[in-house]
Amino acid sequence: MKTIQPRIRLCLEQLEDRILPSAAPDIQMTFATTTDSRTISVNYTITGASLAGQNLSFNVYRSSAYDSLSGAQLIGTATIPASDSADLSLGSHQGVKLSLTAPNGQPLTVLTPNTTLPFIVVVANPSGTIAESNSSNNTASFEIHVLGVIAHGLELDPTLWWLNEVPAWELQMAADLQQIDGYQAVLPFNWIRLSFLPFPLAIQLAGSELYQQVVAEADQLASQHPGDVVDINFIGYSRGSVVVSEALQDLVGTNDPALRGGYMQMTLLDPHPANLAYSQFSWASFLSGGNDLAALVAAFELLTRDPQVIVPSNVEQTQDFDQQTPAGQLGFLFNDPIEFWINLWGELPSAIPNQSAQPIEAKDLTNGSAAGIGLIGHGEMPDWYLANVVDTNKTFTYFD
């Protein structure tokens, strides 16, 4: 008997709607730096899904080690708002600037130098979806190096001319800036053989040479990590203040990443351009020797015609330590007999053109004295600064 198999009829049934799970958003930090010593610029890549509609937050720390949050201090936070779809879209984002809010809720207006916590660590934490950690994907780090620059003034010691050496105080200051204040490098600038030449070109040559040395040193320091920048304290004594002023003016508008993002400080130790249009000095007019020295100084300054000290726009902080102590005081006989005859005066802050956004901070040491230094005249200013500012580790914070 023949068996007939039932036919199998195929048909399609409509299934319930299914939603495939989407990839979770992720962010990879690839680079961080500062281009203005105020804000943080970051590069990052968003994968998985767009973050549009979510806030993307960043925490910024100062640390003692590269890409490490161990013992780090939170210095500011920043948020890319959910409405900023351009910076929250899938893909790579370059040079996004973050303006920081300090932990006290106030805007963080400047990244001040900190030699004990030289590293900046930026952590991305988009709306809490990525755990904040010291992982490699959502952190980026760079180092802010601190460089010191010292420029002496006119030197009349023939031994220094012959040996082409800077004065002893300059070498001591350079050593203490590194050993006590934690500066990574210091340039004790040598323009000894130019400093006593009585013509204007000498100061221009010195300023140009200092600029080149600063750029070379800063670039070498910043080569240690991607995004590194260099903070610089330019310390100029007497005519050396003109030299650092010239170098800083050459740095205005620089495109060098190491210097463009650096914090520039100008420290003026009794600034005294050798130019009768700007300089002042006191002499013992009751002594013929005093009158002769005054005439010699005037003749030299008529020939040199130094440009004025200027605080250019790229300077974040200016400190001026000056004195106008009269010559002829007996205290100078036991301290610096030359200043008994003639004492050069430092320019007052009000006389210095200031193109920066910050006022000049100043200390007047007229008729002052200090242990081991004696009566403070023009020649004692480097020693006073070394003892009271450098050796107390207050080069950036003296006026705080």
Image (cartoon, rainbow, N blue to C red):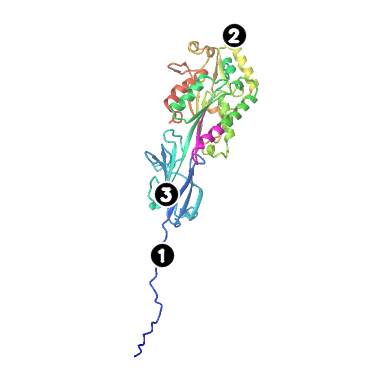
110 vs 329: above or below: below
Q: What element carries label 2?
A: helix
- Judged by depth in the image, the label closer to the viewer, 1 or 3, is 1
- 217 is within the stretch colored magenta: yes
Residue drawn 52% across and 18% down?
A: 379
Identify the residue under disc 3. 57
Residue furthest left as drawn: 1
Residue 55 visible from this viewpoint: yes
Q: Name the residue under label 2.
A: 288
**Residue 237 coordinates in the image, percent (x, y):** 53, 23
Crowding near pointer 2: few (<14 within 10 Å), some, many (20+)? few
Q: Which of marks 1 and 3 is nearer the N terminus?
A: 1
Give the magenta-colored segment's residue range. Answer: 214-234
- In the rendered image, which residue does mark 1 sit on? 20
**Quadrant location of the C terminus in the rendered image:** top left
Looking at numbered disc 3 in the image, what kind of residue is underneath it?
A: Ser
Distance CA(mark 1)–CA(mark 3):
28 Å
Residue 201 relative to residue 63: left or right: right
